[in-house]
Image (tube, rainbow, N blue to C red):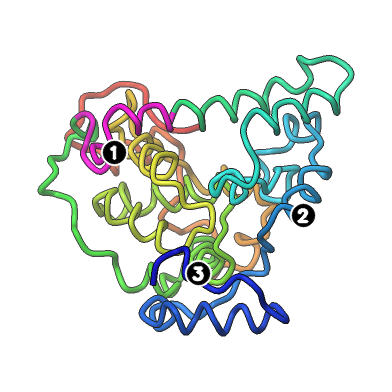
Amino acid sequence: MSENNMRRGFSSREDLIAYVRGQFPDAAQRDDHVSEIRGGRAAAQAQLWKIDPVRYAATRNQLNGGVTRLSAYLRHGVLSLVEVKRFAIGRVRQPRDAEKLINELGWRDYFQRVYKAIGEGIWQDQEAYKTGFQINHYADQLPDDVRDGTTGLKCMDAFSRELRETGYLHNHARMWMSAYLIHWRRVKWQTGAYWFLQHLLDGDPASNNLSWQWVASTFSQKPYIFNRENVERLTKGVYCSMCPLYRKCDFEGSYEQLEAQLFPNRDSETNGGR
């Protein structure tokens, strides 16, 4: 069915959900979760009014920090980058107080410009892996336990469920899960990027794929990694406190120790994602 022929008027949200399921049965069979995130211009504007550029700058790396939650609306053109930029500047005393938020908008614009320049090349390694491994050392298939959220790692399993059930993940959760798949499980970044795009409501190919490549080191100078201390600090221990693998999980150790474990064939140079 073409976009012009799709029904646009619905008596309720449930009516809309039933219609979409009927139009896309294969997608509904693959994943029947319905996110609580509301679409449309009114919902986008309501979320826009909630942004606090100062709190964003101070807390955005924390999982309960002041992120904007505007990405889905930007992805689908409900809001524009310029609109958000102007609104953010209008919410602060000095324009520099909105600098961090505007910088992040700039990264989204940059990724779009790269996408325009290379097209489907965003699915190809822009550079070789800088991990000491060749591309044939990485698996093509997504591990079942990662997909199903049954790894036993409380953080990763929670992120997998949140991705599938809400269509959203905090940026740091995306980075951690990407690094886990690529560097700990040695899965090709394309496999993880495709999995994310199957579920993310803000799943923009440019931002998604080039961010995965940044973690992998095929679009950056070094691979991104993290450790348990980093997760615990930025999540206030919400996962670590209930994890049976606490202090003995895959992410335990200093960055130097983890680098040696993960990249034994790589030249010794400072690396990682502190």
Lateral position of residue 263 relative to residue 35, left or right: left
> What whole-number distance in Å separates the C-alpha atoms at marks 2 and 3?
25 Å
Front residue of 77 and 61: 77
Q: CA distance from mark 2 to mark 1?
A: 33 Å
The answer to whether residue 229 is visible is no
User: Looking at this view, is 217 or 264 the one in front?
Assistant: 217
Q: Residue furthest front?
A: 5
**Residue that badge 3 annotates:** 164
- Nearer the camera: disc 2 or disc 1: 2
Residue at image coords 60%, 70%: 8
Q: Nearer the viewer, mark 1 or mark 3?
A: 1
Q: Quadrant of the N terminus?
A: bottom left
Whether residue 117 appears in magenta in the rendering, the answer is yes
Residues at marks 2 and 3 touching, judged by CB atoms closer than 8 Å: no
Residue where numbered disc 2 is placed: 42
Q: Which residues are magenta?
A: 111-127
The answer to whether residue 222 of the structure is visible from this angle is: yes
Disc 2 + disc 1, Cβ < 8 Å: no
**Residue that label 1 marks:** 122
Look at label 3 and name its amino acid: Arg
Q: Amino acid at mark 1?
A: Ile
| Disc 1/disc 3 C-alpha distance (Å) | 24 Å
What element does badge 2 sit on?
Answer: helix
Reply above or below: 85 against 18.
Answer: above
Asked if residue 274 lies in the magenta stretch, the reply is no
Secondary structure beneath label 3 = helix
Residue type indicated by callout 2? Ala
